[in-house]
Amino acid sequence: MLSLLLAQGADAALDARVEALLRQMTVEEKIALCHGDSKFTTAAIPRLGIERRWLSDGPHGVREDVGPDTWNPAGHTDDFATYMPVNLCLAATWDPALAREYGATIGQEARARGKHIMLGPGVNILRTPLNGRNFEYFGEDPFLAGRMAVGYIQGEQGEGVASCVKHFAGNEQETRRNAVDVRMDERTLREIYLPPFRAAVQEGGAMTVMAAYNRFRGAYCSENEELLNTILKGEWGFRGLVMSDWGGVHSTDGAVRHGLDLEMGSNGAYDDWFLAKPFRDGVRNGTYPVALLDDKARRNLRVILATQHAERGGSLNTAAHQATARRVAEAGIVLLKNDHSTLPLKADAVRSIAVIGDNAVRLTARGGGSAGIKAFYEVTPLQGLLGRVGSSVDVTFSQGYRQPERRPQGRADVAGVRATATQAPPAADPKLIDRAVRAAKAADVAIVVGGLYHGRGGDDEGADRTDLRLPFGQDELIRRVSAANKRTVVVLLSGGPVEMEPWLAKVPAVVQAWYPGMEGGAALASILFGDVNPSGKLPYSSPKRLADSPAHALGAYPGEATEEYKEGLLVGYRWFDTKGVEPLFPFGYGLSYTTFTYANPRLEGDTVRVDVTNSGSRDGAEVVQLYVEPVAPRLPRPTKELKGFAKVALKAGETKTVAIPLDARAFAFYDPDRKAWLAEAGAYRLLVGPSSRDIRARLETRRTETVTVP
Ligand code: BGC
């Protein structure tokens, strides 16, 4: 594939075309490649056959067009898109092949919409459950995030569109995102925060990278010598382009010298941007060597040539796209609790259902900030349930709690993010709760659809949540509804963990449904009624309370001007397991309507094999997870780390041998003294199971020599 070869530097023909073009270009033309000429474009150079280049958000589909000099919608009628489940839901599928289809879907729609570069996926790590953008990322584990990003990017770039992996690096919070200086030790950087980016670039072949807003070790990420020049372009051999986040450039000198190739989203006249006239003048008067400009122009040209096509191609909202959106939701929804086989519901035995909760009727596509989508349609949870049961079941709806309308307010910041919902969040409404309780009492089953929302205090760009609790009086609502109806199912729409202790023991069934995209309601109904057997697994650890979560336990979040990642390597389950803290639900956890047994684990060469049997009476899918535990490491290491996984579909009664390959990298850690990855000689345990805390098989292996791993 052209695009993959491009990033790895193997496409000599493309390089030759780039050089031929470069030789014909004036300084002005090269400069024009290095900065925007509207919110989401760079200038065409018709004389050389270079088209206007279009960029677009984002990770969950092709964003609505804004227009040219404003964040306000352009008012087009042809800028709808398929709204995919959020990336956190995709991560919960643990299925890189599905990520590839997901990426391909967006790639096809980007082609149809005339976009060349898609601004996603985001691979920042879930360090705090409160990050307002966790819903856009792949969770807390660098290995899982890397696998999903690689699938996504290969699928998207396979359609001839460039992916932009973001936000590089250390953008794990929205609080003070434009200025905070992120600090962490070298091992933490190398072992936790960089691996998904490295996988995206080296294995996925991502053609573009977006520098984060924040500072890292003192310097803004858009002018960060260490991140951009030393690591990304130097050590990793990245040959694509680095763009700024929108409005994330702070100086001409920093951006020119320290690795930025494309400036986007700055304020003021386009010609006055940092990489426009000031850069040109600097080249003219000898401040900046022409070679620096040529390097940036070359990187831009490579991406332009790889994404400029004779035919526009692509397709929008096809039946296949809708089916992919639905399959991702069905594979990513996680069944957290299911006492007394409350689920699946039996369509012929249930006569009445009380659907309760604002999220049952709320549209989510447009929310959340830059990841919002103008969806062709969106099946809400209530619509999905109604569609599933038809007229055979009596379905009532009761709002139960009220969340603020997502009304943008105030001035937009440099990235176009406006403060939403500045009014005080509504508290529990006793009248709504009373009505919901009456509805629950009168029905066979109560389904409360709650969780968070895309607005302030929820899953929203530009601000973090302020606590872990469910907002708008939902704890009381769920307590009262579950007291009124023993068969209460709680469905949570959210982009991360929420506190459940106030009601969890009283509720027999809980489903984590993320923001499941435009087919989400239909997917949810198929899970609740058992047409689809749930197979999603949490891509993060759910803490019992916020203070159990590492950055919070250490008082390390939110810092002030500096954010010190004091928990170091111990992010997510690495913390819970190493410190012996009991999570509410562990990383990798998720139930099924069937059961799986593990037998005959063995290590054959470099491959772990285990026989997995579906020992229940329904077809299903299991995510087999492989963790590596060093027995006596020289440097402190997390007790165990995910190093492989495989999702396997099994018919009732069926057995399959699952094979998970391991290479030296799976045993390696970053040695800051040697500045190298080392897989040390010594004993290791290989732990296999359906979650990080449910280990069904243990193997031991000994590595006889210490090797460095590239
Ligand atoms: C976000 C990016 C996004 C860009 C363009 C910024 O506010 O941080 O993720 O791609 O805007 O909309």
Image: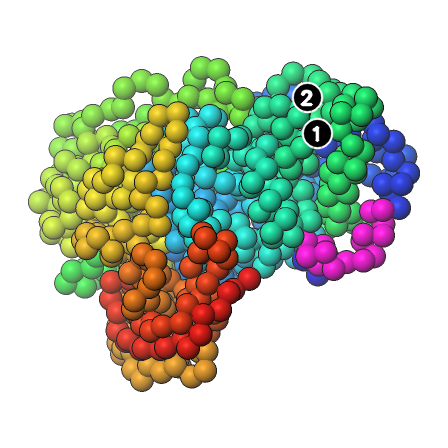
Work out how far the residue at label 2 is from the one at label 1, CA to CA, in angstroms: 7 Å
What SS does tag 2 mark? Answer: loop
Residue 99 is tagged as: none
- Using residue 101 as the reference point, say whether residue 425 is left or right of it: left
Write down the quadrant of residue 21 in the picture: top right
Q: Residue at x 39, y 81 (%)?
A: 603
Q: Residue at x 68, y 36 (%)?
A: 261
The residue positioned farthest toward the front in the image shown: 673
The residue tagged 1 is: 35
Residue type, mark 1 in image:
His
The residue tagged 2 is: 273
15 falls in the magenta region = yes
Main SS of the magenta part reads helix
What SS does tag 1 mark? Answer: loop
* 229, 114: nearer the viewer: 229
Q: Is mark 2 within 8 Å of ligand 1?
A: no
* 162, 125: nearer the viewer: 125
Quadrant, the N terminus: bottom right
Say if residue 85 shows up in the picture: no
73 falls in the magenta region = no
Within-10-Å neighbours for mark 2: few <14, some 14–19, many 20+: many
Q: Position of residue 695 (x, y in %)?
A: 26, 69
Q: Residue at x 68, y 53 (%)?
A: 7
Q: Position of residue 705 (x, y in %)?
A: 44, 74
Q: Position of residue 218 (x, y in %)?
A: 48, 30
